[in-house]
Image: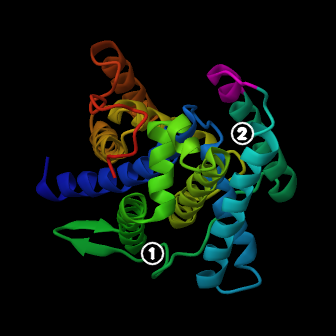
Amino acid sequence: MPVEQILQYLLSGITNGSIYAVAAIGFNIVYNTTGIINFAQGEFLMLGAMTAISFSKIMPPWLAIPLAIIVTAIIGGLVDIVFIRRMKKPTVLNMIMVTIGISILLKEVALHIWDEKVRSLRFFTGDETSSVNLGGAFISPQVFWVLGVSALIVTLLTLFFRYTALGRSMRACASDPDAARLCGISTKNMITLSFMLAAAIGAAAGCVVSPLTQTQYDCGTSFAVKGFTVAIIGGLGNSVGAVIGGILIGILEAFSISILPLAYKDAISISILLIVLFVKPSGLFGNKAASSLREF
């Protein structure tokens, strides 16, 4: 295989892997605070992109995208306040089933608002014909936006959980909810914040990948499946593992195209997930307690 082609696959894999990692981090934030898997996370990516596309028709993209992220974060908070918080002594299974129902509800609402048409944001730099020659591999300038935003999200989350009062409060709730309550921390508010933060991260990811992947009312499902898969492979609750696992899956999927038909691309990640679950159920980097946010 020529070096240029190897580089092309590698860059494509890192790009897709970064998207998977950001989706997985959204899963981890909610899991670490509540102990549940939020299967509506993929819909937050879709809502962020769709809202930004609608706003971009009446305002410049640099304003439409941040506003869409804020709106999606508010929706994420409402999901907790309206549905999760009202449940009386719910089991983990109950809450998982509720998030699946919320995912279906958000998808149906999106269908009625935006119909079945495929939409996309404009390329942040250049257009669909623009490309950058990097060592013989040609990639879209939008790829650099994807990688940059993904790196920025991970960096900001690191700083947030390590150095801010809210971040430390969330870590306390994750480590010992009862002790956090005794210290005056509102665990309910921290859970709402975790949903808002996960929704905002999902919206940002949805906006930045929209020019490359395009957006439709049901596109969130594929992001959710890949994000959940990466979260499990990396070690549920371990965001560092999610980043490594996401890039690993992205690269393996990219190189699989040279061997297998494109239709088998999604089967690669599921196959790796099954192997990891059989060999190491806690995930590749799941040796630390999943209920902690100390990875940041």
| Residue at the (42%, 30%) spot, across then down | 264
Q: Quadrant of residue 88?
A: top right
Position of 239 with respect to 200 (left or right) is: left
User: In this figure, which residue is indicated by the disc labeled 1?
Assistant: 129
**Residue 109 vertical placement versus 152 (above, below):** above
Is residue 91 inside the magenta stretch? yes
Looking at the picture, tell me which residue is in the foreground, 253 or 80. 80
Name the spot of residue 48 as percent of width and height, x first: 65, 61
Local secondary structure at mark 1: loop
Bounds of the magenta span? 89-97
Q: Is residue 290 above or below residue 217?
A: above
The location of residue 236, given as percent across then percent down, is 41, 33
Residue 254: image x %, image y %? 32, 44
Disc 1 residue type (three-letter): Thr
What is the tally of numbered marks visible in this picture? 2
Q: Quadrant of residue 122?
A: bottom right
Lower sequence index among marks 2 and 1: 2
Regarding mark 2 in the picture, which secondary structure is present there?
A: helix
- For badge 2, the amino acid type reads Ser
Q: Residue at x 53, y 57 (%)?
A: 213
Which secondary structure type mostly characterizes the magenta part of the structure? helix
Residue 226 in the magenta stretch? The answer is: no
Return the residue at label 2: 103
The residue sitting at 61% across, 55% down in the picture is 193
Relative image position of residue 211 (x, y in whole percent): 54, 67
Q: Is residue 220 visible?
A: no
Residue sitting farthest toward the top: 278
Q: Is residue 266 visible?
A: yes
Determine whether, in the image, residue 220 is placed left or right of residue 262. Answer: right
Residue at 50% across, 50% down: 170
